Image (cartoon, coloured by chain):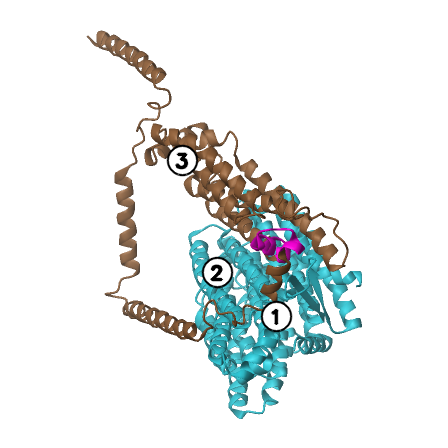
Amino acid sequence: MKGTDNRCGGIKAFWRAVWEKDESDSQPEILKLEREYIPDEHAILKHRRDHDRMIEKTYDIEHNRIYGFFRRFYRVAGLLCAMALILILLVQVSYLPPVGNSHNPGSNEVAAKYIEDGLQDTGAVNIVTGMILDYRAFDTFGESNVLFIATCTVLILLRNDKKKGKDSAEEEEKRDSYYEPKNDVILQTITGVLVPIIFIFGIYVILNGHLSPGGGFSGGAIIGAGLILYLNAFGFKKTERFFTEKTYKWVSFSALTFYCLAKSYSFYTGAHHLESGIPLGKAGAIISSGLILPLNICVGMVVACTMYAFFALFRKGGF
Amino acid sequence: MAFVQNVPFFSIILSMFSGIISSVLPEKQAKWLNTAVITLVGAMSAWLLSYMLKVGGSYTFMMGHFPAPWGNEIRAGALEALMALIFSIIMLLSLLGGRKKLKDEVEITKHNIYYILTDLLLSSLLALIYTNDLFTAYVFVEINTIAACGLIMIRQNGRTIVAAVRYMIMSLLGSGLLLMGICMLYDLTGHLLMSNIQESVQQIMQESSYQVPMMITIGLITVGLSIKSALFPFHAWLPDAYGYSTVSSAAMLSSLVSKGYIFLLIKIFYRVIGIHIIRGSHILNVLFVFGLCAMIFGSVNAIWENDIRRMISFSSVAQIGYIYMGFGLGTEAGMVASVFHILMHAATKSMLFISAIGLTDASNGSRHFSELTGSGYRNKIAGVGFTVGSLSMVGIPCFAGFVSKILFAQAAVAHNAPVKIFPTVIVLAISTILNAVYFLKTVIRIYVPEKRAYEKKQGYLSFRLSEQKMYGITIICFILLNLVLGMMSQPIVHIIEIGLQNFS
């Protein structure tokens, strides 16, 4: 009896395997990641209960009068400080010069020169780009370093450096697909259509930064958003074919290095009143305005990488 | 233009570039690059300092092809060069002294991020020292803030994360107020370059058209920067951030990061607003009162503390109070004393942090006083370093602390308003006694011999100098730096005086 049971079980298992194989063949990848991962609800609840109990014990207002007093005091004091700040700022706004008045202190020779000579000095039709990447390029270099260092800080906080075995990677993939189901046909199809358009638009915004509104920061943000959309639709495995942590490292490294070297050269020649020898080109052409175009590309790359890296780190603690 | 005048530009760009390169280097090379860059920056600053002392005055350096109100500009003089020199020396020593601890406390894969952060921190400090443009200052304040957060939380345990979050919130509040102030200043004057703003501000104060918003703006900037540098009522983030982060971070945060903001505030007072307008306003009186409170409350908190690292952190609150008290006096002498105190505190506090870690290592890593008994014998060089640091903080002659205390006292006595003389002198005396209470208590504690049997039972380790050469050399360098500041203070005070005169 026992033997037949076993045999029956074996046969059943065999047929089930065949059937599942067929299923997965006919609908590739969709059934493979069915919801097998069930988080241990009980453990989570227990952990939460412990946490609540700890909080109650630590902040026991019944027995800890001083804590109770300070909690109330801080609430009131915080409210009062915020009200005072709001009041001060409102008073301040009422005193400030009216917006858009031509006699404002803001409309002086500095702004006038940017508007009048901007095109001639920098070769950029878009004055804003000329300002941030040529007149005040040092500030913008600092700003791209802010992005760089922000990614470093998030890396410290979220990067998961523990060596993972193959099992745990698979486990992670399951957990991932449980919380955020992917392989959604609608999402994938639409992403397939949208992502190329988004990328092309982002590249257009970056390359045209010196001619029309836009530039490295906005174009980079668009490309980064496209990358994030692609990641959400197709998952890490597909994204890793062209964008890994190594790619991130080298792209942002080379972009910042180029920015640093190019601008150091330009600062050095500028400070010593030497000709930089970089042609400004014909205003309005796509290849014009000297260093602005390559710098825009660099900034765009850094911004796109930063956005994607933030998303990937928050999602999974790695790329 | 002499070649040496490129030094400010080179040192800022070099330290930023090394940070960028470190992102692709393995941990060891990043460490060497970092050490090399800091040394190089220090050497170049010394070169610039000797040149500026010979030439006198100050000069501006154009960052790009466009002259000042349109492009960016940096400015250097003897005081800036001195600051850069001392900051880079202290950064180098703090990193060398905490290197072993860094290995224990931080994951090895994150070491090169640590060096990226320190490189960029150095660049931002240099930029804050040299900048002549208010917006550039803001950009580098941002880098400084983020780098400091990273330095706190790179040692990952619950306490550092909480400390980093607190630091982030307070620091961003300060940055926000500073940014609002800069925006309003731009709205009122139409400039971002420091010297141009000063001209417009003087005009505004004479014409009396925008006086009220100008005062509010100055207030916002001052409050913002004093939040960032942990002046008394805003110091709640400080003890956790300095007490639990890895020791190099604690030394750099306490001695450099907060000092960078204070130096920026001095620059804003002198170069942006004009010191006589600041003196005419009541802002200095407010700073004076809070400085006095900080001197008392910081020390009282330090006495209550039972954890050596947190005690040293609370002592920072008191010392920052001294600096703001010097501002509050409103005289040239008070300002000179404050700037000297910045240097003295930077040199001494980093030494205290670094030597405290040697003492705790010799007591199984415990930071409580009861377990530190006799640790001065178990780790001799750390004990010596801690003693020298404590004596300097208390203000024993020969050490740096004595000079800054006497400068403060002289500035107070020479003041013409008795309303400020008496509180300053009295609080100075009380605070010195309180300093002595908690520092000498610790020194006595570490030199009270513990029973051998008990030490053996607890398994305390003894460290010889030969086992920790790098650490020993670091402490000796710190002691020498302290003695230089303490016994050769005259030329340094002279540099500070001419530097402040150049500012105005």
**Most common SS among magenta residues:** helix
Q: Nearer the viewer, residue A226 or A20?
A: A226
Subunit of mark 3?
A
Counting residues from the N terminus, which is met first, the one under dot 1 or under dot 2? 1
Residue B128 position by quadrant: bottom right
Q: Which chain is brown?
A: A
Mark 1 vs mark 2: tell me if same chain. yes
Q: Amino acid at mark 2?
A: Ala
Q: Residue A119 at x, y = what percent?
A: 63, 54
Q: Which chain is cyan?
A: B
Q: Residue B157 at x, y = what percent?
A: 45, 51
Q: Amino acid at mark 3?
A: Asn
Tag shown at residue B241: 2
Assess disc 2: are there few (<14), some (14-19) or many (≥20) residues with their C-alpha within 10 Å of its C-alpha. Answer: many
Subunit of mark 2?
B
Report the side of A228 relative to B10 (left or right).
left
Q: CA distance from mark 1 to mark 2?
A: 33 Å
Assess disc 3: are there few (<14), some (14-19) or many (≥20) residues with their C-alpha within 10 Å of its C-alpha. Answer: some
Query: Which residue matches tag 3?
Result: A232
Tag shown at residue B194: 1
Looking at the rendered image, the quarter that the C terminus of chain B falls into is bottom right
Q: Amino acid at mark 1?
A: Met
